[in-house]
Amino acid sequence: MTTELNGLPEQACEEVLDFIRFLKTRHRRDTRKAAIASESALGKDWLTPEEDAAWSHL
């Protein structure tokens, strides 16, 4: 991968770095969205009196 970056003009390297930062930000945002979306779905199964009783000894 670094061989692809060798020889690029500095401006192009800055654009690549900006794009990498964008991808990281988007990945974190998508991960948070998935966690939030799954919370309500999982809560239907996990937030029950039966589950509370099953885990009460811990």
Image (cartoon, rainbow, N blue to C red):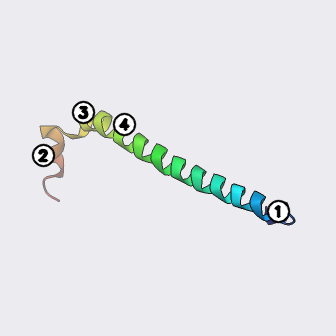
Whichever of labels 4 and 3 marks the residue nearer the N terminus, that label is: 4
Residue underneath mark 1 = 9
Report, in whole angstroms, how far the alpha carbon at label 4 lies from the one at label 3.
12 Å
For disc 2, the marked residue is 53
- From the image, state whether disc 1 or disc 4 is nearer to you: 1
Residue type pointed to by label 1: Pro
Assess disc 4: are there few (<14), some (14-19) or many (≥20) residues with their C-alpha within 10 Å of its C-alpha.
few
Place residue 4 in its image quadrant: bottom right
Q: Secondary structure at mark 2?
A: helix
Q: Which residue is mark 4?
A: 37
C-alpha span from label 1 to label 3: 54 Å
Residue at the far front in the pictured view: 11
Between discs 1 and 2, the one toward the N terminus: 1
Q: Earlier in the sequence, mark 1 or mark 3?
A: 1
Of circles 4 and 2, the one toward us is 4
Instruction: Give the Cα separation between the discs numbered 1 and 4.
Output: 42 Å
- Mark closest to the chain's N terminus, 2 or 3: 3
Along the line of sight, which residue is nearer the eye, 16 or 49? 16
Q: Position of residue 22 (x, y in %)?
A: 58, 51
Callout 2 crowding tier (Cα within 10 Å): few <14, some 14–19, many ≥20: few
Alpha carbons under labels 4 and 2: distance apart: 25 Å
